Amino acid sequence: MTDRKSIRVVAAEIERDGKFLITQRRPEAMLPLLWEFPSGRVEDGEDDDVALRRELVERLGVQVDVQQLSMFLKHEYDDYVVDFCVYRCTLKTEEIEARRVHDWRWVTPVEMDQYEFPPADAQTLQKLLENR
């Protein structure tokens, strides 16, 4: 068995009026055009909350308050392992821009099955719906 690279990813669970913010990956990204919670990689030496705030500014142009960890998953892909941490967040800004995402939407939990998510996000989504 070979050691696979481990990647730490932080994602934001942002709810407003019973809807959750999801984003669509760009066409040139890995797992292109799939939907996900707004997320990004944690850089070496970076804390989760700092990484999540940075990624949300870079991807959507928004400021957030990062709150408690709502779930953690370890998902194994063929070439790497993702440590996937989802934090509840509150938007501090109203204006959302698709800066480094293809698109974004506010969707209800019932509507989420209309969107294709990567495996790690799909597991997160399942846990989120079970906890509601």
Image (tube, rainbow, N blue to C red):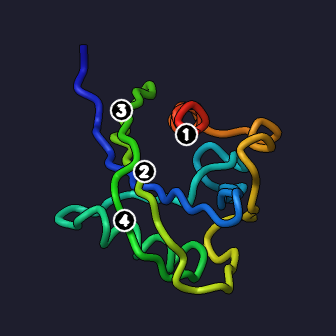
Mark 1–mark 2 contact, CB under 8 Å?
A: yes
Check disc 2 and report the residue beneath it: 86
In the image, taking residue 18 as reference, residue 82 lies left or right, namely left
Which is more foreground, mark 4 or mark 3?
4
Q: Residues within 10 Å of mark 1 (few under 14, many from 20)?
A: some
Check disc 1 and report the residue beneath it: 128
Answer above or below: position of 106 versus 132: below
Mark 2–mark 4 contact, CB under 8 Å?
A: no
Mark 2–mark 3 contact, CB under 8 Å?
A: no
CA separation, marks 4 and 1?
A: 16 Å
CA separation, marks 4 and 3?
A: 20 Å
Which is more foreground, mark 1 or mark 3?
1
Which is more foreground, mark 2 or mark 3?
2
Which is more foreground, mark 1 or mark 2?
1
Amino acid type at mark 1: Leu
CA separation, marks 1 and 2?
A: 10 Å
Amino acid type at mark 3: Lys
Answer above or below: position of 33 versus 82: below
Label 2 vs 4, first from the N-terminus: 4
Label 1 vs 2, first from the N-terminus: 2
